[in-house]
Amino acid sequence: MELNLITKGVPYLLGVLMASFSSAISDPLAYNFLQCLSQYPNATYSDFVFTPKDTEYSSVLESTIINLRFSTSTTPKPLAIITPLTYSHVQSTILCSKRFKIQIRIRSGGHDNAGLSYTSHQHSPFVVLDLRELRDLDLGENDNADNTSYLNAMKWGYKYFGDNFRRLAMVKGVVDPDNFFFFEQSIPPLIMCEGNSVIGS
């Protein structure tokens, strides 16, 4: 009877020790990652980084979870959720993740039924980079109150849409020349007049 108790108790004890050991390892990694983020200029991480110690962490993590299979207590959770407000926040997140070999899960507000943007199937340390706040076509150079101009949007528009950007802007100039249907990610209108000169840049 005593031998039976010992053989059943040892795996349980090993499991508890391994769990406490893994949590002890993950804390320094998260701490080092956050220290790394704070070293970069324009990256006061208290404004855009949520860790499991923050009260908003769970609500931010679960805000876009569609498939409830990935919202359980056993689902691997990120070391931190980064909701960058500027491109420099994205840069510092990538550099620090690379430095500490932490995987990055990108979340942008789209559909993700497989849980790839907020969990890790390999059980590796990871952070979630939530891009919902980065909505400008020119990555933050626009004033949200103003309409994005074609000239300001060209830099990123060509990177994203390639040679189609000018054609799409011309269509927008015909269909919506006053940019009535404006939002941060919309293509600005390019209005052509005689001689192929640009109006409203």
Image (cartoon, helix red, strand yellow):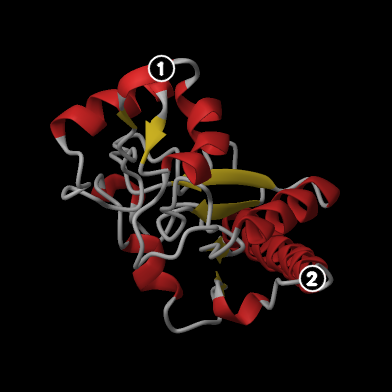
Give 149 or 44, whichever is nearer the viewer: 149
Can residue 58 be seen here? The reply is yes
The Cα atoms of the two marked residues, 1 and 2, are separated by: 35 Å
Residue at horizontal 68 percent and vertical 78 percent from the top: 44
Q: Can you tell which mark lies on residue 164?
A: 1
Q: Which mark is residue 183?
A: none
x 35%, y 48%: residue: 70
Which class describes the residues within 10 Å of circle 1: few (<14), some (14-19), or many (20+)? few
Which residue extends farthest front?
194
Indicate left or right for 22 with 137 as reference. right
Residue 124 seen in render: no
Q: Secondary structure at mark 2?
A: loop
> Nearer the viewer's eye, disc 1 or disc 2?
1
Residue 144 shown left or right of residue 173 in the figure: right
Q: Looking at numbered disc 1 in the image, what kind of residue is underneath it?
A: Asn
User: Please, is residue 61 above or below residue 168 in the view?
Assistant: below
Say whether disc 1 or disc 2 marks the residue closer to the N-terminus.
2
Pick the residue in front: 5 or 11: 11
Q: Nearer the viewer, residue 196 or 67?
A: 196
Residue 77 percent across, percent down from the top left: 51, 57
Binning the other alpha carbons within 10 Å of mark 2 as few (below 14), some (14 to 19) or many (20 upward) gives few
Q: Residue at x 50, y 19 (%)?
A: 162
Q: Identify the image quadrant of residue 20.
A: bottom right
Asked which quadrant contains residue 16, the reply is: bottom right
Quadrant occupied by the N terminus: bottom right
Amino acid at circle 2: Pro
Name the spot of residue 61 as percent of width and height, x first. Answer: 40, 62
Give the residue number, with chain letter if any, for mark 2.
41
Residue at 78%, 55% in the rendered image = 96
Give x and y (percent) for residue 103. 66, 44
Task: Please tell me which residue lies in front, 128 or 12.
Answer: 128
* Image coords of residue 94 (percent x, y): 71, 49
